[in-house]
Amino acid sequence: MNSLKDNSADGSFYEGRSKQIVCGGCELLCDDVTTQSIESGTGCAVADNWFAHSELQSESMIDGRNASLTEAIDIASQRLLSARRTLVTGLVSTTLDTIQIACALAECTHASIDANASENSILTAPTAIRVGGVTADFEELRDRADLAVFWGCDPRADFPRFIERFIQPVPHDASRRTISIGPTPVLLPSSHNLHFSVPEDQLVSLARLVHAQVKKKPTGKSFSNLENIAVQLTKSIDAARCIGIISTKTVEQTGLVGWSLTHLIRSLAHRKPSFGIRLNAEADAGGGNCAGASTVCTWRFGSPGAIPVASSAGSEFLPAEADAQRLIERDEVDCILIIGRLPSRIEDLLTISPKPKTVIHISDTSSLPKYENSICLGCASLSRSTEGDMLRSDGRLITLQPFAKSQKPSIQKVLNDLLNKLAVETQRRSTP
C-alpha cells in the first residue's frame, strides 16, 4: 500500500494527486481507499463518516468546563479509583496496542470490560467456539470461490464495499455465481445471481435439510418449499469447485443458525474447498477493530468480552449478563471509561440512564454532553493521525498510517499516561 506521508503545515493532501489511505470505519478495514482529499469524499458513506471527525473538535474537559489534559488525567484517575464499579468499553476505534493498555487499566481498577460487540449480548455467544468452524480470509473468497452464498445476511448496509471488493471481481479461471437466502435478494437476480426467499425462522431447518442431503441421510418432516430449495442448493453446491458461505454472527438470538451452518460448512469442506465468512451484524460500534478487541481480551482474560472483573489470573465470561449494554441498563456500574469513539448504543443508554454516572471519554471528538461528572481527554484524530495495527474480522492485520500532523498526543499515549497516573495515585493512597 502506498501510504500518505504528509509534509504540509496543516496536514492536508498534496494537491492534484489521488492518495491511497486506510479506513478503520468498519470491519473490512479497507486499505485501498483512494481519494484526492478527505473533504471531497471517498465514495463510501462509512469511510466518509470515519474520516469526518477531526481533532479540532476534541478538547479536554472536566464537568463541562475546558481543562488542560494534565488536569483532566489527574481528576480522571481519582474518580476511577473512587468508583464502586467501573466499566471499560469502546475500544473498537483504537489500535491493538491501545487495547492492550486498556486491558491493563481494567485489571488495575478491577473493572468490567466489554467492547459492546453484539455477539456478547446473546446467551449463546460461545456456541461457535464450542462447535468450531472452517473459515478463510476475504481474499480467499474473492480469488477462489466460484459459488458465494449469502445465508440470511445482506452486507450492503454495514459493509458497503464488501460486494465491490470480494464478490464482483472474477475468481481465477472461473465465473462466480451467487445465491442469497433470506427475505430479499442481495444482488439483482439473474442467471448467475439466484435468490431463495426464506424467512429467518426457517434458516436452521434449511441448513439441516441441505446438510442431510450432502451427507445422503434421510430427512424428517419439513416445509415442502424448503425441500425444493434444499435440492436446488445442493445441485449448485455439487456443481461448484469452491464454496464460500457468508453469514452474520448475530442474525438471531438463539445461536442455532450459526451452529447449524457451521456443521454444514464442515461437512462440505470434507468434500471440496468450502469455508464460512462471518460478519458482524449491527456493527455500528464506532470503529472496525471489533476482532482486535475480542482477540486481545481473549488472550489476556480468556474471553472476548462480557467480563465482569478483568483479571489475567482468571476471568469469567458472562454473555448477556456482563456485556456493556446490560451493565449500564441495570445501573451496575457507576463509572464508565469509553476508549475511542462513542458507540451509538452506549450514547443512547447514557442519555436515558436514570442514575448519574461518572463518564470518562478518551477520544478525538467531544461527543459527550457537557454535564456534571463527565471528563473528556482529548487526543489526536483516530482516523487521520493514528499509527498502529487493527485486526480485520478474518484475522488479517491492517496497519493504519497517519497522513495528517497533530499537535495532540495519540490515544495510546493519553491512555498510558492515565494508567501511569493511576499507579502513582494508588501508591499515594496506600502510603500511611
Image (tube, rainbow, N blue to C red):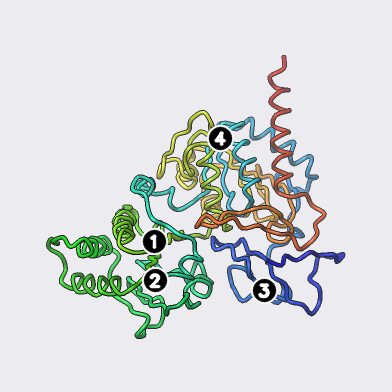
Q: Secondary structure at mark 3?
A: strand
Residue 162 spot, x, y in % from top left:
50, 70
Q: Secondary structure at mark 4?
A: loop
Q: Residue at x 29, y 56 (%)?
A: 260
Q: Residue at x 69, y 44 (%)?
A: 375
Q: Which residue is mark 2?
A: 148
**Mark earlier in primary sequence (3, 4):** 3
Report the front residue among 331 and 254: 254
Q: Label 1 vs label 3: CA separation?
A: 30 Å
Lateral position of residue 123 relative to residue 233, left or right: right
Question: Does residue 68 lie above or below 226 as drawn?
Answer: above
**Mark earlier in primary sequence (2, 3):** 3
Q: Which residue is mark 4?
A: 111
Q: Label 4 vs label 2: CA separation?
A: 42 Å
Question: Does residue 36 lie above or below 214 as drawn?
Answer: below
Q: Quadrant of residue 24?
A: bottom right
Labelled pair 1, 4 in contact (Cβ < 8 Å) = no
Q: Label 3 vs label 4: CA separation?
A: 40 Å
Q: Label 1 vs label 4: CA separation?
A: 37 Å
Q: Secondary structure at mark 1?
A: strand
| Disc on res. 275 | 1
